[in-house]
Image (spheres, rainbow, N blue to C red):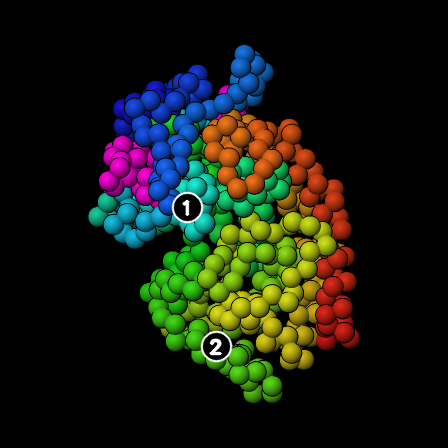
Amino acid sequence: MMTGCGLFLWQASLVTVLAVDAGAVLRQDGAGLPQTWGERDGWEVPAWYRVTLPAGDAASEREFVAAIGALPHLLLTLPVDDLFGVEKGIYRHPMETGDEWERVAKIQYVPESGGVGSEVTGGVRIQGGWNRRPEESPKHSFRLTFRARLGPAKWKLALFGGKTEGFDQLILRAGNNYSWLHWSGTERRRADFLRDPWMRATHAAMGHSAARSRPVHLFLNGLYWGVYDLSERPDGKFASDAWGGKERDYDSRNADKVLSGDAVSWDGLFRLVNGGVTNASVYVQVQSVLDVPAFVDYILLNLYGANADWDRASNWYAARRREPAGLWRFLVWDGERTLEEVTDWRITDDDDQSPMRLFQRLRTWPEFRKEFGERARKHLGPGGALSPERAAERYRALADRLAPAMAGEAARWGDYRRSIHRYKEGPYETYTVAGHWRPEVERLLKEYFPKRTVVVMENLAAEFPGGMGK
């Protein structure tokens, strides 16, 4: 039986939720736990365990209780020293990486309807880049791993729809950009927690493999930790499931990091394009290594979103089958710096060893421009995945799913930058669903999506005189 803060009662192997004590969630205070989470430059970053609601506001309490029941629950239970301990606690040392900073945990999933869920023993480690830094965010992401030496080699559960599937890794995305914890006052005011899921869902709507995700409420040792996006990791295993074969058959990359296989084919591709796409022979060689139509769609999506946070080292995955030799394809990841201003345009971005370097070199060749134009008209045109109606419908569906749960996130983290840790840039406000989240969602639905498609089409026409090979 899990004790924690008395939030749940469990029958060990059946994983049946018997009761949810929302009052205990509202009273959680982290008594006896460390009051700092990590150190930067000699300064201890303040911890925060509480849930904050307006005092005596019965309506807010009812809204919070409803929010907690609106999403599935993901529970991580592990020894306190492994989580918060001074010497080896992963939350006290969030900048540490590698297998030595993975901890064994009981991992439980309970559908939002309650009842029978699923339980497994697996590994837990801190995940991500910028929001690992304790001063940047007290709410860290996690990677969950499942191996035979810890328990089942795969966690089998119905996570995305009614079908039971096996997962060897999952990511609990905390959110960083456009969250209520970001250093930028502007980003905090416009937090929506939807940009990255929208980017991945849109890539799927364009006909490509994309990591699926769903929002959940996370509990750490019984303490409510807020809304997270539980997602697949688009690595070599993901590629093999999507495109056939086994993980060992693939070269896969997380930006500049080789996850499986090697960099031989990748380096060869960049030597080729950096030498200049100056004749048909070079372009044919590129087509033998890179899935050009899929690449065009990937670039179109990122130009539509005006991705402001990707380079050679961050925020994209890529994979290709080694045997038999396949083509490189890109996978969307961490699209949080998108959908900002309707007039944004980032077509001149360039960085060697990045997707945009490939684009900048390929766009000089007429056949590529023709391919680009054809696919732009398909996806930006009426009924296309990037048309105003389809883009907005997809965003609204994601927002409607998340909306009933956002009072939980607001109560857990909405007051942190005002009352606990004022970091870098004001204004320091208490962030709420009605005052901040809903206005940003409506801004995007009413002002961004209805206009963005025309902006992109006009900019592309200016960049590719003659209609992009039309």
Amino acid type of disc 2?
Answer: Leu
Q: Whole-percent x and y of residue 415?
A: 52, 29
Q: Nearer the viewer, residue 196 or 30?
A: 30
Q: Whole-percent x and y of residue 370?
A: 69, 75
Q: Whole-percent x and y of residue 100?
A: 25, 50
Tell me which residue sits at (66%, 55%) in the image.
385
Amino acid type of disc 1?
Answer: Arg
Q: Secondary structure at mark 2?
A: helix
Q: Nearer the viewer, residue 459 or 151?
A: 459
Q: Quadrant of residue 304?
A: bottom right
Q: What numbered label is drawn on residue 269?
A: 2
Position of 420 relative to 315 (above/below): above
Badge 1 is on which residue? 133
* Magenta span: 65-94
Of the residues tagged 1 and 2, which is closer to the observer? 1
Residue 89 forms part of the magenta stretch: yes
Q: Secondary structure at mark 1?
A: loop
Query: Does residue 413 appear in this view?
Result: no
Position of 201 relative to 261 (above/below): above
Residue 414 horizontal side relative to residue 462, left or right: left
Q: Whole-percent x and y of residue 67?
A: 53, 26
Residue 101 horizontal side relative to residue 372, left or right: left
Position of 420 relative to 278 (above/below): above
Q: State which tag comes first along the sequence, 1 or 2.
A: 1
Tell me which residue sits at (60%, 76%) in the image.
362
Tell me which residue sits at (66%, 70%) in the image.
372
Q: Quadrant of the C terminus?
A: bottom right
Q: Nearer the viewer, residue 189 or 425?
A: 425
The crowd level at tag 1 (other Cα within 10 Å; few <14, some 14-19, many 20+) is some
Q: Quadrant of the N terminus?
A: top left
